[in-house]
Amino acid sequence: MQTIKVLFLDRDGTINRDSGSYISSKEQIELIDRADEAIALARNAGFRIVVVTNQAGIARGITTVEEVEEVNRYLYDLLAVRNAHYDQCYFCPSHPDYPHPEYDRYIDFRKPATGMVDLAISDFLKEGFEVDRSASFFIGDKTVDIECGLRAGLRPVLVRTGHNEEALCYQRNIIPEFVADDLYQAVTGYILPGG
């Protein structure tokens, strides 16, 4: 079985700008400067790319599964222009404060829980690839991203774009392995040189 390394990426605030509200249309997607370049460099270095994103706007009735899937497809196409497309994308529609008969079964997928990461690793395994967690990273802009990465046995990196919860991470003793100004600096300044 072939071993692979994976870059797990949060979406809003890490790859694209976080609008401050739930993104429900492709018109709201704006890439963060050089995010596509960073992903392309990681792909060229042999990383698989997996997007994992909480999308509680679905449970809250602000957006729909179809709208989130359309936004994800648009993001894929946008990144593909720079050979920065992702291999897999997972999203969690549930929220503990907004019970929903259809989405509550996904509650273990909501970051900081590791359901989406576990599913990605399981899906890779079905294709004959074993994920080397010790060589794989989780990059995000929130404390939940860092906590999810730590719980999943990945190497967590916080970016200062989006919500930039650097102070909150340290306050809660959820410590990233590295803090970068943005995804490009995370990849070029830490992950690719060998960390």
Image: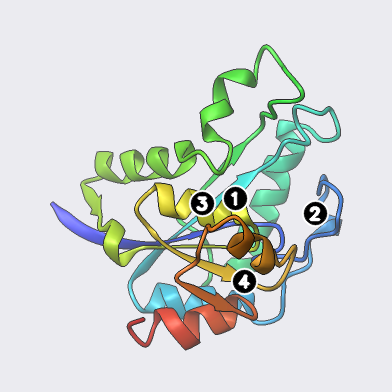
Q: Which mark is residue 147?
A: 3
Question: Where in the figure is residue 98, as x and y percent of width and height?
Answer: 77, 23
> How many numbered marks, from 0 up?
4
Asked if 150 appears above or below 24 in the picture, the reply is: below
Distance Cα–Cα, label 1 vs label 2: 25 Å
From the viewer's side, name the closer residue of 51 and 83.
51
Amino acid type for the residue under numbered disc 4: Val
Q: What's the distance in space between the residues labelled 4 and 3, CA to CA?
A: 14 Å
Q: Residue at x 84, y 27 (%)?
A: 61
Q: CA distance from mark 2 to mark 3?
A: 29 Å
Q: Tell me which label, 4 or 3, sits earlier in the chain.
A: 3
The amino acid type found where label 3 is placed reads Glu
Q: Is residue 28 above or below residue 122?
A: below
Kindly identify which residue carries mark 4.
Answer: 159
Check if mark 2's residue and mark 4's residue have beta carbons within 8 Å.
no
Say few, some or many: other residues with alpha carbon within 10 Å of mark 1 (under 14 / 14 to 19 / 20 or more): some
Q: Is residue 166 above or below residue 86?
A: below
**Label 3: few (<14), some (14–19) or many (≥20) C-alpha neighbours in 10 Å:** many
